Image (cartoon, rainbow, N blue to C red):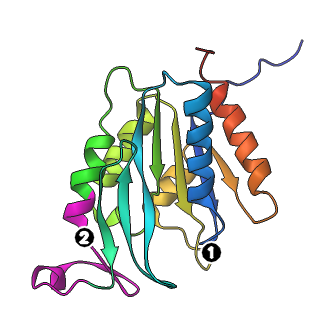
Amino acid sequence: MAAPSSPPSKCLLVTGAPGVGKTTLVMRVLESLRTSHPNLNIRGFYTREIREGPERVGFEVVTLDGRRGPLASTKVSSQESLRWPSVGKYKVDVASFESLALPELQVKEGTDLFIIDEVGKMELFSPSFLPAVLNVLESNVPLLASIPIPKFGRDIPGVARLRNHPGASVFTLNTEIRDASREDIYTQLVNLFPKS
């Protein structure tokens, strides 16, 4: 007798080196799902680089309905920003991040999918962020998230909790397998939703 097949994973995590295309992949999957399943209620956010010419000067948070605000910048110099946490040369605006991201992670009736790009060091400076992500994970609503690759073999503790979650499927991107991963992720997500 054949063993019963396990249900498709409801927590899909995309990881890979910086610049490999995690956000691009997540956004392409989102576009494909919005085309094939236009009635899905998808909540969440993504992060986008802010550039001045060739130089990256920060990141912003963008909700899936288009609201945006600063996440981190090299250009802040207010008195308040002196107390903000840093990642490398970037000062992280935790209050701005929380005001946009946290409402998007509230588990509400009728939500079909959460997208979180990304669960990383900057975002985890918010003490409320990881509990909100874990609440989404426990809600049984499908989740597509991007996470950083461990640096020097060490994972960020909050990221490790997601990566090691029993229901998580992790897709590691590199430049050669981006398109194949996008297809795999899209196929797994689509199988969670009946055709509308």
Residue 42: assigned label: none
Q: Does 170 sit above or below residue 18?
A: above
Verify whether residue 83 appears in magenta: yes
**Residue located at (63% from left, 52% from top):** 25
Q: Given the image, on which type of amino acid does mark 2 rest?
A: Asp
Could you tell me which quadrant the N terminus lies in?
A: top right
Identify the image quadrant of residue 193.
Answer: top right
- The one nearer the camera, 5 or 104, is 104
Query: Whole-percent x and y of residue 101?
Result: 31, 51
Q: Residue at x 35, y 59 (%)?
A: 61
Q: Give the amino acid at mark 1.
A: Gly
Give the residue number, with chain letter if any, for mark 1. 153
Label 1 element class: loop
User: Within the image, what quadrant is residue 184 found in?
Assistant: top right
Expressed as whole percent of the image width and height from the top left, the position of residue 195 reads: 63, 15
Decide if residue 25 is on the left or right side of residue 51: right
- Label ID, residue 93: 2
Establish if 43 lies above or below 180: above
Q: Is residue 127 visible?
A: no
Q: Residue at x 17, y 80 (%)?
A: 81
How far is mark 2 from mark 1, CA to CA? 28 Å
Query: Image quadrant of residue 98?
Result: bottom left
Viewer can see residue 30: yes
Q: Secondary structure at mark 2?
A: loop
For label 1, the crowd category at 10 Å Cα-Cα, with few meaning under 14, some 14 to 19 and many 20 or more, is few
Q: Which residues are magenta?
A: 76-97
- On the picture, is 132 further left or further right than 11? left
